[in-house]
Amino acid sequence: MKCPQCGKELPDDARFCLECGAPQRGGAGTQARVAGPGAVAHQGGVAAGAGGVAVGGDVHGNIYVGPPPRDAAEALRIYRRVLLSTCRHLPLRGVDLGASDPTGAQQRFSMARVYVDLDTRTQVAVSRQDRWKRVRVEEEEIRPLKVLEATIANRRLVLLGDPGSGKSTFLSHLALCLAGHGLEPEAGWLARLPGWPEDEAGSVPISVVLRDFARWLPDDRREPAPCHLWDFVAARLEKQQLTFAAEPLCDALETGQAIVLLDGLDEVPTAAQSGFVHDAVAAFAERYPRSRILITCRTLSYQDPAVQLSGFPSFELAPFDEDKIDRFIGAWYDELARLGVVRDEEKDDLARRLRDAVRRPDLWRLAPNPLLLTVMALVHTHKGRLPDARALLYEDTVDILLWRWEQIKTGVEDEAPPLRRLLLDAGRTDVDLKRTLWRLAFEAHQEGGDADEEALADIGELRLEKALAALHPQGSRDWAQQVIEAMRLRAGLLLERAPEVFTFPHRTFQEYLAGAHLSAQADFARQAARLLEQGAFWREVVLLAVGRLVYLSGDTDKPLALVGELCPEKEKDEDLAWRKA
């Protein structure tokens, strides 16, 4: 057959043209990977995923490999299908039982089924209708403004929050529901967005991670312009074999039928890039005044006037309250039961036990953070209990993300997972790999410096490969690549955020692993004191290192020595000394 775009002769089963990159009809018969319980698609068919929306056999991950669309409407439908496949599941791979299984037999947590609506810290008056429902009505009764309400009321919005507060998850949820509604309007997706304007039900989400945008920018860039952000979107569409969607997406931007979701305004690597990205976003917003734009940023970073955007009101996410914590835990075990991980008759008791566990005073402080609550649910699922200290909780989570969760998924306890088998082949142990990851986390945290005290650091694949090859007796890079592949597919501690770029699931894990490396140093007290002089970004690392020493190693000598370093008998009364202490 010939490529309809460039005329090049191609094999009959070609999925895309090697000359021009255009998708071909010959690849339409590729088998689909199951995105949840449902049917497998063959010969260009579709498979119904766990959320009820059909997942086409020509969508692989975030790549489209099917035939070109007939018109703009079909182009947007294909775009929505690809978008749906990228945001329909929880992002933490360790949660997704089966997410690493390359055979396609996946069972992954549905985003829609476990998502809990978020509030902001803004208070609004309770409506008269809601007040009538109450037996006792107080004057000027107020309630938190829901983040969805704030989004609906403001076409331009900056959503603020602490790390792990749910900013990115809300963007994914919004994109998921709008994409799902665009594919199947009768499937009830819009009911998950109560109050969404009917005339904007067909809004097309355009999602951008601003850190990726910053890395894509050419070095010789000139003045920030609207075209910079659009060119990045177009370049990504090309990589996804979705070039045909560029024109209808541009039309949607012009007519106000697009919602642009920009994640991480303050997570841009360098100060120079940060200023450029800020101005490029502002220029883009001015160029497309009719479309909605929602931006996320961490609360502390947005206090800087240089980061703030004119014409964008800001709202800060509130932590989970008790009701939301309990609802999440209930939804968590409902989903586990649906996937067959726990028995249906056990789910209520398991949920009750986790609700009781997170109410311990030391853990109740963590539970309002959605990410940390997810971590605790993950540990509770696999251990049946929660440990007594934060360092123990993170240690258990690290172990789950590296090995244990796959054993539970397969039900084969006596068979070592692939990652562990690779270590055995090289004469190495679990601890050897963990120490390497500790050091990588420590170095990445150190190199990040205090330019951004909350951002995650990236670890390049070549650097990771070199560090892992040092574990092999012959320094084998091939073996190191196998370890990377095993972690990429079957573990969740290092996530491939972009091609050949890895990062940790959350800042907390980076800090804990860096703390583990610090705690293993013979001169721990002196090193910790010196690090604290460098900036506040080492504070959590040192605290977690102390927790690890006390609760995991039973070592109180090193922490007491650190107290001596920070509080010597004769110390000048200086700000630095007080900050260290």
Image: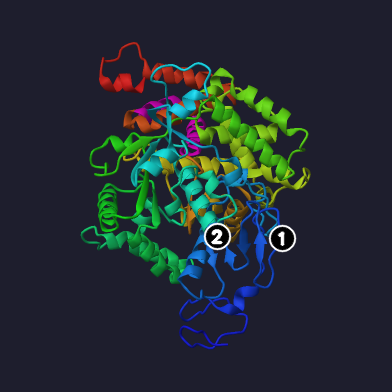
Camera-nearest residue between 522 and 381: 381
**In the foreground, 200 or 514:** 200
| Earlier-in-chain disc, 1 versus 2 | 1
**Residue 31 found in image quarter:** bottom right
Q: In this figure, which residue is indicated by the disc labeled 2?
A: 183
| Image location of residue 97, percent across then percent down | 66, 46
Mark 1 falls on what kind of element? loop
Q: How many marks?
A: 2
**Residue at figure coordinates x 42%, y 63% from the top left:** 236
Q: Pointer 1: residues within 10 angstroms few (<14), some, or many (20+)? A: some
- Residue type indicated by callout 1: Ala
Is the residue under label 2 in contact with that under label 1 (CB below 8 Å)? no
Q: Residue at x 60, y 84 (%)?
A: 11
Quarter of the image that includes the C terminus:
top left
Answer few, some or many: residues within 10 Å of disc 2's Cα (few below 14, many 20 plus, some between 14 and 19): many
Provide the residue span drawn in magenta: 507-532
Looking at the image, which residue sits at the far top?
569
Q: x and y percent of residue 376 in the render?
A: 59, 32
Note whether 213 is above or below 8 in the view shown.
above
The residue shown at (51%, 84%) is 3
Q: How is the image coloured?
A: rainbow
Residue 396 visible in the picture: no
Reading the image, the residue beneath label 1 is 39
Q: Residue at x 51, y 56 (%)?
A: 179
Q: Is residue 271 left or right of residue 407?
A: left
Amino acid carrying mark 2 in the image: Leu
Q: Position of residue 287 (x, y in %)?
A: 26, 58
Q: Is residue 2 magenta?
A: no
